[in-house]
Image: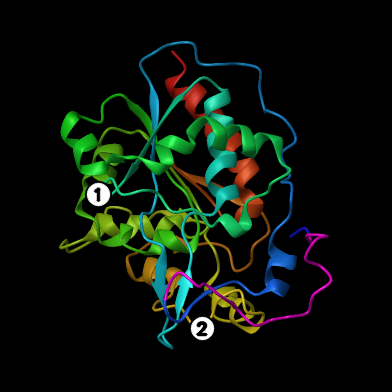
Amino acid sequence: MNVSAEAASTDDRNPTPDPAEDNAFFPSPYSLSQYTSPTTDFDGLSTEEKYTGDRWRVLVIGTEERYMLMRNNRFFSTGNHPVETLLPIHHMAEAGYSIDIATPTGAPAKVEWWAFPRSDDAVNATWNSLAEAFKAPQSLASVAAEGLDKYAAVFVPGGHGAMNGIPDSRSVQQALDFFLEHDRLIISLCHGPAAFLAAGLDRESNPFSGYSVVAFPDEIDFGANVDIGYLPGEMPWKLGERLGAAGITVTNSDMAGATLRDRNVLTGDSPLAANQLGKDSVAALLEQFGD
C-alpha cells in the first residue's frame, strides 16, 4: 500500500490507545504509515454509460459495531474501512444507481476514520453526499419488511468491523436469501464476506457453499497485522478459516488488489481492490440492470 508521507517518519509499532473505551486501541503509527494514504488509486470512471431509470437501487449494509474484542481482551477500534466503503459506492453512484444505507438495527454505521483518505476527491465527494445516511441509516429489518425488489445489488463493505454483528444477523440472512434467490448482485471485499456466514445460520449448509471469493488473508491478520501493531492482538476468529468451514473457497493468500466474480457474487481482496471492484460492479450492474 502507499505510505502516508505524514506518518512515514515514525517507527512506533505500539497500537494507539482509544480514549473512548477501556483497553481499546487504534492501529499503531507505523502500521498507518504502511496501510493508509491521503489519496486512493481512483483513476476515473470505467465508462461514460449511465443508468437513467428510476427502478434499480443499491443497498449498502454497514456495520454498527465499533469494538472487536480480541483474544487478549483488548478492544480493536474498527468499523467500515472508508476506502473499501466509499470508493466502490462512488463508482456505482456515478453510474446512476441510487444508494441506500442500512445497518442491522438502524444504529449509526461506524467508520474507521483513521483510514480516511482526506485528499481524495472521489472519496470525499461520496462521503459528503452520504454522510447523513451513514450517521442515520435505515434498519435492515425495516428495509427487508418493506420489500427488497427495488435493489439490483447489495454491497457489504470491508473493514474488520464487518466481522462484528453482521455474521450473526437474521436480517442479513434474510437479505442475502433474497439476493441469491432473485439473481441480484452481491458485492463485498476484504472482511466484508464475513456477512456470507449469516446465510448459514441454523442451516445444515450455507447457501454460499461452493462459491469462490477473494478476501483479506488470515495469514496477514494473524501475522504481520499483529506484529506491526495494526491489530492490538489476535482476532477472536479467522475469517478465511470460518468461510472455508462453510464451504466457501477463498482463492487468495495475499492482498494484491485481486477481484473475483463467481456467478452474481463479486468480491475484492483488500483496500487495494476497492477501485477495481467498483468498476466491476458497474459493469455487472449495467449489463444486468441497465434498463
Which amino acid, by three-letter code, is at mark 2?
Answer: Gly
What's the colour scheme? rainbow
- Can you tell which mark lies on residue 233? 2
Within 10 Å of the Cα at label 1, are there few (<14), some (14-19), or many (20+) other Cα atoms? some
Say how many tags the image has.
Answer: 2
Query: Left of 286 or right of it: where is 104?
Result: left
Q: Is residue 287 above or below residue 171?
A: above
Give coordinates of residue 97: x percent, y percent. 47, 23
User: For the residue carrying disc 2, how many other residues have a C-alpha within 10 Å: few (<14), some (14-19), or many (20+)?
Assistant: many
Residue 263: x and y in percent read 43, 41
* Mark 2 vs 1, N-terminal side: 1
Which residue bears the numbered disc 1? Answer: 105
Q: Are marks 2 and 1 in contact (CB under 8 Å)?
A: no
Disc 1 is placed on an element classified as loop
Q: Quadrant of the C terminus?
A: top left
Magenta range is 3-21
- Horizontal side, residue 52 vs residue 280: left or right: left
Front residue of 193/101: it is 101
Q: Main secondary structure of the magenta part?
A: loop
